[in-house]
Amino acid sequence: MSQPAGPEIDRLIQLLAKLPGLGPRSARRAALQLIKDRRRLMVPLADALRAASESVVTCTRCGNVDTSDPCHICRDERRDGTIICLVEDIADLWALERARAFKGRYHVLGGV
């Protein structure tokens, strides 16, 4: 029995399914939406993924990800360098930053 899609589409679905929260069915739906709206979604997403792949680095001071090392948080001289918040992963750091709940430095335990 033949596959309903070519190998490129199958690969896209398989890669999307590796993302947290996306199983095979959700990955198929996402892939179809990307394909249907190629100009508005797929092309800009591919460009953003390529740019991020080439420019995002891990901060050697705290473990955050940014386009510079040290990251913008570690470079911020207004932050209190006498207190460090240990976070499990980068998502926790980002959540605290969105909440504007902490004005010190961070250390990411889980890395990237």
Image: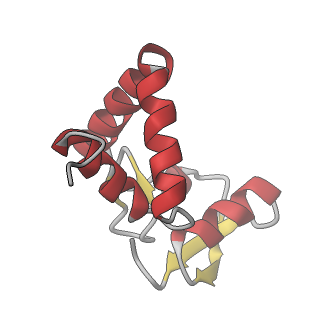
Task: Answer whether residue 103 is visible to the viewer in this image.
Answer: no
93 or 37, which lies in front?
37
Vertical side of 62 occupied by 41: above or below = above
Q: Position of residue 69 (x, y in %)?
A: 34, 53
**Image color mode:** secondary structure
Q: Position of residue 53 (x, y in %)?
A: 27, 45
Q: Is residue 81 left or right of residue 65?
A: right
The quarter of the displayed image where residue 82 is located? bottom right
Residue drawn at the location 63% of the way across and 60% of the way down: 94
Task: Answer whether residue 5 is visible to the viewer in this image.
Answer: yes
Q: Residue furthest top?
A: 39
Residue drawn at the location 37% of the way across and 44% of the way down: 67
Q: In this view, does 1 lie to the left or right of 40?
A: left
Q: Is residue 27 left or right of residue 73?
A: left
Which quadrant is home to the C terminus? bottom left
Report the number of numbered marks. Answer: 0
Vertical side of 104 occupied by 31: above or below = above
77 or 111, which lies in front?
111
Q: Where is residue 43 in the image (x, y as percent from the top left)?
A: 36, 22
Residue drawn at the location 20% of the way across and 39% of the way down: 6
Q: Where is residue 79 in the image (x, y as percent from the top left)?
A: 66, 60
The quarter of the displayed image where residue 103 is located? bottom right
Q: Is residue 34 left or right of residue 49?
A: right
Vertical side of 16 occupied by 48: above or below = above
The quarter of the displayed image where residue 35 is located? top left
Which quadrant is home to the N terminus? bottom left
